[in-house]
Image (tube, rainbow, N blue to C red):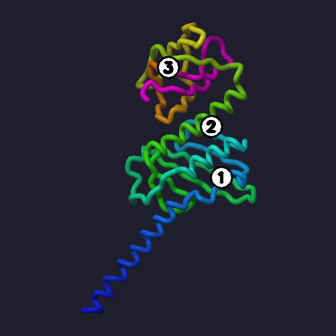
Amino acid sequence: MKKKKRKWLIPIIVIAVIFLGLIIYSETLFSTLSSDKISMITVTGQPSYFDEVVITEQDEIENIVTYFKNLNTSINPKSLFGSGGFAFIIKIVHKNNTTKTIHLYGTRYIKVNGGPYVRVPYDEGAYFSTVLGQIMLDQYREKNGGNMISGEVLSIVSANSGHNEKIELKKDSGEVIVIDVSKSRIFDVTGGGWLVLHKGDRLEIGLKNESGYVADKVFVVESSFR
């Protein structure tokens, strides 16, 4: 009888050790990250809807590191159910040339290098869009600040299958204009994840060097849905 109990006890112990290991792993996932040891961070999307973001400024690196160090992670179920099919791919390059690659799936799951999936609270996962979006907006302002306008969406003038084509925008100056956004990239800095625009959204828009108002990049800085 004692031998049978021992046979059952071994797999239970093994499972408990694995479970404890996963808990420790999830809790220490980003504890060793240090901004002063990092030379560069790059961020891409899969599938891609924005250009690769290259981050080398120390304060921007610090923002990314702080975000990950403050995440609440937990061991994850086996599937990526509810991940939404999109992932941020964050590559951290250290000054000693070692790298760490982080996959953030659909604001719900994280995987570091070849490690197991861990789960993050939805709001915390979604907040990465805000951190990244602010960096993207700051970089874009620095390069194209003289060719940007801001204001509130008054109406969607025309849309095709849910894709925005033109919007009516009330500029901060009070002037109302119509902007072609059909070929622009939209990024929601609020973390809401919207790739379409809505009445009441506040935007910062970079314009193409074309006649009329044609948008190059559109940043949602205040969403009417949040």
**Rendered residue at 28%/92% (across/down):** 2
Q: Report which residue position mark 3 lands on.
A: 165
Label 1: which secondary element: strand
Label 3: which secondary element: strand
| Tag 3–tag 1 contact (CB < 8 Å) | no
Q: Is residue 218 magenta?
A: yes
Badge nearest the viewer, 1 or 2? 1
Q: Amino acid at mark 1?
A: Ile
- Give coordinates of residue 152: x percent, y percent: 52, 17
Q: Specify the quadrant of the image occupied by residue 58.
A: top right
In the picture, the quarter occupied by the N terminus is: bottom left
Q: CA distance from mark 1 to mark 2?
A: 17 Å
Q: Residue furthest left?
A: 1
- Rendered position, 43 above or below 95: above
Q: CA distance from mark 2 to mark 3?
A: 21 Å
- Give coordinates of residue 6: x percent, y percent: 32, 87
Q: Report which residue position mark 2 lands on.
A: 51
Q: Amino acid at mark 3?
A: Glu
Nearer-the-camera pick, 23 or 80: 23
Mark 2 crowd level (few <14, some 14–19, many ≥20, 10 Å Cα):
few
| Tag 2–tag 3 contact (CB < 8 Å) | no
Q: Magenta part of the protein: which range?
A: 201-226
- Give coordinates of residue 191: x percent, y percent: 50, 36
Q: Between disc 3 and disc 1, whose residue precedes?
A: 1
Q: CA distance from mark 3 to mark 1?
A: 36 Å
Label 2: which secondary element: loop
Report the label total: 3
Badge nearest the viewer, 3 or 1? 1
Nearer-the-camera pick, 24 or 46: 24
Q: Is residue 163 magenta?
A: no
Q: Report which residue position mark 1 lands on.
A: 92
